[in-house]
Amino acid sequence: MSEIKLKNRRTFTPEFKLRMAVQIVSGQRSMAELSREHHVKDTVLARWRDQLLERGSEIFGAPVSEKEKIEELEREIGRQHMELEILKKASKKLL
């Protein structure tokens, strides 16, 4: 039985993917140019471009107000306080 040798897949950093996608979207460079220069298939570049366009609104969404942030932190503190009290009671019963 012969062993099948798998090619090592290249991995790219999120920063690299973003830089490539932005260059395509902004029109600075064409997909073909980037594909040739970085030896990345145009289908991969197209996927990165599409991901940027789909998720861009999440990145630049409405900022969270300070009031909402404070309320969220207060809820988290309250939840942690309740958990701590439960653990204290449970530890007393075990001792």
Image (cartoon, rainbow, N blue to C red):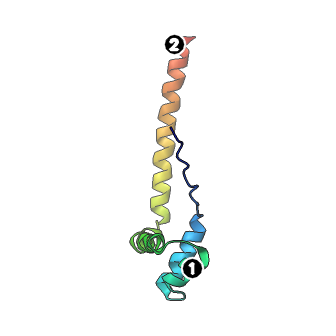
- Nearer the observer: mark 2 or 1; the answer is 1
Front residue of 85/40: it is 40
Question: Tag 2's secondary structure?
Answer: helix
Residue 75 location (% of width, % of height): 45, 47
Residue 19 location (% of width, % of height): 57, 76
Residue 9 position by quadrant: bottom right
Above or below 16: residue 7: above
Dot 2, how many residues are within 10 Å of its Cα: few (below 14), some (14-19), or many (20+)?
Answer: few
Q: CA distance from mark 2 to mark 1?
A: 68 Å
Q: Residue at x 55, y 18 (%)?
A: 91
Q: Amino acid at mark 1?
A: Arg
Q: Are marks 2 and 1 in contact (CB under 8 Å)?
A: no
Kindly give the residue lying farthest to the left in the view shown.
54
Q: Where residue 36 is drawn, which disc sits there?
A: 1
Quadrant of the frame with the C terminus? top right
Above or below 46: residue 84: above
Examine the rendering and report whether any part of residue 62 can be seen.
no
Q: Residue at x 47, y 75 (%)?
A: 42
Front residue of 40/20: it is 40
Examine the rendering and report whether any part of residue 9 can be seen.
yes
Query: How many marks do you count on the picture?
Result: 2
Kindly give the residue lying farthest to the front in the view shown.
1
Residue 33 position by quadrant: bottom right
Residue 26 location (% of width, % of height): 49, 86
Dot 1, how many residues are within 10 Å of its Cα: few (below 14), some (14-19), or many (20+)?
Answer: few
Earlier sequence position, callout 2 versus callout 1 = 1
Q: Amino acid at mark 2?
A: Lys
Tell me the residue that label 2 is attached to: 93
Q: Residue at x 50, y 56 (%)?
A: 70
